[in-house]
Amino acid sequence: MVFRIAVLGGDGIGPEVAAEAARVLEAVSSAYGHTMTFETGLIGGIAIDETGSPLPQETVSLCRRSDAILFGAVGGPKWDDPSASVRPEQGLLGIRKALGLFANLRPVRLNAALANASTIKPGVLEDTDLVVVRELTGGIYFGERGRRDGGRTAYDTMIYTEAEIERVLRVAFELARGRRRKVTSVDKANVLESSRLWRETALRVAQEYPDITCEHLLVDACAMHLIRRPASFDVIVTENLFGDILTDEASMLSGSMGMLPSASLAEGTLGLYEPIHGSAPDIAGKGIANPIGAILSAALLLRHSLKLEQEAAAVEGAVESVLADGYRTGDIAQPGGETVSTTVMGEMIAGRI
Ligand code: NAD
């Protein structure tokens, strides 16, 4: 079987880290006897420079005929004018919409070798291994908004249909079945009507998964428990705005932006996989970016789009083994400690598959 992978590097360090993720997928192909083809496409600032659009139609077509998408990052000071009519991030929002990527998965697993990198005490973090599933195409970011009273009153609308809530909850429950079988559904059902519909739907869907423990938390309580007892969570599922905030909070448990992967899934098996960090213009072109977030995103690609669990685990194991041996890029090194480049880190991990 031939797997077709679209590679959208984007801007800044995006292409540098995406190239290392592709290198690791190539190593997986040859070690496990798969065939993967890699085709690159333009997105973000570089696409604006070359075509005038942050998301050329050709890129959308490339993604549609691919099995999965490896994404780097978009944006940078060159395109930063907030009043510009075309902006790099429109490329990312556009591709999410065009492909119907409604569920965003962000796993946070503490790496024993980096336990001291977080600002949270190591004892609290011990055994932390969770995934936040964030609804990505509904809620307040997509509801009606506007101004009244000559601009002096502003409103945004949080709106969800039962179907939108149900499909993302199902992603979370299915995911929990392959993990520790616990789902925490997060809402604000004591105040918001959209959250009451969320809670009702979660209670109903949970009945179909008697093998999964389901707890319901208010978002404010969840924010507190995330830093008080992070190891007690397995799968957290929530709507778009709450998820936006909780995923950033959760990412800080691990201590480094450069380490964390994400997956954005559509119905079926198509998905887009990207590190959670941005284009890091301050270090772009220097060959020092940490490629591990992108490489762990490639592991999620293997798991969720290609259904190659053993290969996904092999990538995660290779990352752990390279870190356990002390190899570090600058962002995760001890002050004054030895560091390796983006490429060397990628080659080391690929070499251990
Ligand atoms: P950023 O994540 O790009 O960088 C924040 C800090 O973390 C910087 O100091 C950077 O050097 C460091 N960093 C990030 N990734 C790293 C890595 N892999 N290795 C080592 N260090 C790393 O966030 P920012 O500075 O707020 O944003 C820069 C640009 O990226 C902006 O244009 C922003 O809009 C864009 N952005 C894009 C995405 C995306 O494409 N999904 C996400 C966030 C930000």
Image (cartoon, rainbow, N blue to C red):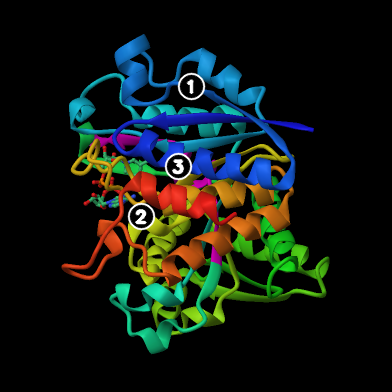
Query: Upstream in the sequence, badge 3 or badge 2?
Result: 3
Disc number at residue 211?
Answer: none
Instruction: Tally the marks.
Output: 3
Give residue 290's position: percent from left, percent from top: 35, 52
Where is residue 236, by image quadrant? bottom right
Residue 20, numbered label: 3
Most foreground residue, 320 or 201: 320
* Mark nearer the N terminus (1 vs 2): 1
Callout 3 crowding tier (Cα within 10 Å): few <14, some 14–19, many ≥20: many
Quadrant into which the C terminus falls: bottom right
Read off the residue under disc 1: 41
C-alpha span from label 3 to label 1:
16 Å
Q: Quadrant of the N terminus?
A: top right
Q: Is mark 2 within 8 Å of ligand 1?
A: yes
- Report whether 103 appears left or right of 344: right
Q: Earlier in the sequence, mark 3 or mark 1?
A: 3
- State the residue in front, 54 or 139: 54
Type of amino acid under label 1: Gly
Return the mark for residue 258: 2
Residue name at image x 32 percent, y 39 percent: 13
- Residue in view at x 56 percent, y 55 percent: 194
In this orientation, which residue lies closer to the viewer: 69 or 112? 112
Q: Which residues are magenta?
A: 131-149
Please provide percent x and percent y for residue 199.
63, 65
Query: Which residue lies at the image location 42% right of the left edge and 70% below the top edge?
Result: 325
The amino acid at mark 3 is Glu
Q: Name the image quarter holding residue 35.
A: top right
Residue 139: within the magenta? yes
Which residue sits furthest front? 351
Given the current orientation, which residue lies at the most extreme top position?
51
